[in-house]
Image (spheres, rainbow, N blue to C red):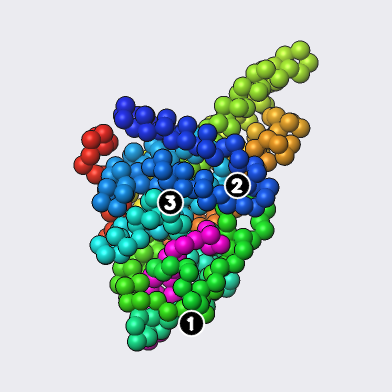
């Protein structure tokens, strides 16, 4: 993402680009082929400080601001070229950790954040169910009161990191709570009554362990509620907002190298005595994905700025998700076309990234859902009424007063 980074931010970006290139990229294809998750790699990434860039030092983080975090993630994505690791990263760091920091109590943050930031624990954000995805109000996981806390009953399905998660932030319908029933809970996954599935066999994102979690009369303590009883939709809304913006950020990191490789290959690949880059149709393909990337970057900057100011930016976030999904998919197809049979081979990462890109069209909400979000916002604006929420706690993405923070 080509913005004006400060010298400190450029150094952060370069550092995490190297981390991604050296630690993640060499074995990305192996994890995709074997449908495996490398916990030691996860710990090594945590040791680099990646999981705590924008987390407070009190919990083991670096205490930096959103632009330092953006620089780190942009560089890391460009270096690693592994959507598997990136999707797992966003699920934990951008949703679970940020959700805890923004909605959890001090005791809850002290209880769970240090182990997440250090990489000793892996977190998952469990929303989806087999019969409910984007329509979160229809979720069926139930929570009932017990003498020492709550009991959860039901299943979460198609959850990123579920097969390997040590901690789960999930959402259930609290019985007897009426309209304000949906509540956010945090729990360790080794509790009796909680069962994690093996990783699902998927077309793409095979380096991301995705599966189900069953809750069979699982007992949770009183301090397991995040944000208060009946306040789960606020935490959910926060999660959706942040995930969509940060998806744009990891896509910018992944697409830029595709453009660079297309330019380099087309400039040296000869056909009929001249580089194929001399052909206007080849130039047009590359210019098209570059144009998509620049458009995504422009909207992404507005989204990141809104998060920093603590503003609801759901319309922007959905625009970012649509643009990001299309940009990554189109860039992968273009790279394969320009590289020909070489780009089609399994030993090159284009085909892996192409398979991964398909998941973006429905993960975190389908493209149609995002268009609906944009439409409802446009309609509200046309009727001179606002859909923006003013009670979002975007604490994790506020600017922090630190040496080297963005000006």
> Depth-wise, is mark 2 or mark 1 nearer the camera?
1
Quarter-wise, where is residue 182 in the image?
A: bottom left
Indicate the quadrant containing the N terminus: top left, top right, bottom left or bottom right. Answer: top left
Horizontally, is 363 left or right of 107 in the view?
Answer: right
Q: Is residue 141 above or below residue 271?
A: below
Q: Residue furthest right?
A: 272
Q: From this viewpoint, is residue 292 visible? A: no
Q: Which residue occupies 31% across, 49% down? A: 60
Q: CA distance from mark 3 to mark 2?
A: 26 Å
Query: Where is mark 2, residue-wise?
Result: 357
Q: Residues within 10 Å of mark 2 (few under 14, many from 20)?
A: many
Q: Which residue occupies 47% across, 68% down? A: 189
Query: Where is mark 1, residue-wise?
Result: 217
Label number found at residue 119: 3
Quarter-wise, where is residue 110 in the image?
A: bottom left
Q: Is residue 251 above or below residue 263?
A: below
Q: Which residue occupies 41% across, 69% down? A: 187
The mark total stands at 3
The x and y percentages for residue 207 are: 60, 50
Q: Earlier in the sequence, mark 3 or mark 2?
A: 3
Indicate the quadrant containing the C terminus: top left, top right, bottom left or bottom right. Answer: top left
Horizontally, is 126 left or right of 12 in the view?
Answer: right
Q: Is residue 287 above or below residue 231?
A: above
Magenta-tinted stretch: 161-185
């Amino acid at each position: 993402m080509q913005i004006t980074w400060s010298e400190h931010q450029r150094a952060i970006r370069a550092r995490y680009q190297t981390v991604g290139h050296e630690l993640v990229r060499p074995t990305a294809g192996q994890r995709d082929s074997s449908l495996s998750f490398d916990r030691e790699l996860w710990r090594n990434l945590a040791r680099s400080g990646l999981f705590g860039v924008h987390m407070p030092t009190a919990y083991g983080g670096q205490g930096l601001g959103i632009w330092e975090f953006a620089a780190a993630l942009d560089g890391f994505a460009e270096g690693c070229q592994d959507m598997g690791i990136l999707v797992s990263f966003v699920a934990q760091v951008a949703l679970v950790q940020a959700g805890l920091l923004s909605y959890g109590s001090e005791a809850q943050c002290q209880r769970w954040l240090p182990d997440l930031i250090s990489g000793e624990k892996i977190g998952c954000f469990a929303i989806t169910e087999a019969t409910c995805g984007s329509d979160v109000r229809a979720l069926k996981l139930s929570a009932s009161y017990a003498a020492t806390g709550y009991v959860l009953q039901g299943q979460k399905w198609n959850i990123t990191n579920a097969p390997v998660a040590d901690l789960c932030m999930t959402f259930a319908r609290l019985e007897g709570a009426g309209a304000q029933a949906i509540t956010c809970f945090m729990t360790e996954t080794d509790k009796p009554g909680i069962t994690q599935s093996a990783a699902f066999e998927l077309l793409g994102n095979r380096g991301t362990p995705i599966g189900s979690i069953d809750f069979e009369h699982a007992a949770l303590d009183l301090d397991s509620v995040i944000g208060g009883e009946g306040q789960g939709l606020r935490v959910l809304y926060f999660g959706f907002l942040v995930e969509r913006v940060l998806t744009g950020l990891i896509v910018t990191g992944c697409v830029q190298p595709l453009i660079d490789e297309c330019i380099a290959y087309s400039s040296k690949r000869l056909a009929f005595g001249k580089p194929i880059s001399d052909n206007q149709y080849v130039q047009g393909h590359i210019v098209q994905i570059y144009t998509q990337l620049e458009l995504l970057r422009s909207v992404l900057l507005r989204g990141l700025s809104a998060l920093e100011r603590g503003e609801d930016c759901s319309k922007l976030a959905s625009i970012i998700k649509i643009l990001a999904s299309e940009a990554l998919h189109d860039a992968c197809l273009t790279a394969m076309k320009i590289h020909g049979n070489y780009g089609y081979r399994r030993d090159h990462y284009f085909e892996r990234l192409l398979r991964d890109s398909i998941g973006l069209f429905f993960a975190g909400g389908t493209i149609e859902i995002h268009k609906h979000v944009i439409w409802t916002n446009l309609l509200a604006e046309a009727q001179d009424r606002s859909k923006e929420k003013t009670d979002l706690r975007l604490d994790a993405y506020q600017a922090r007063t630190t040496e080297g923070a963005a000006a």
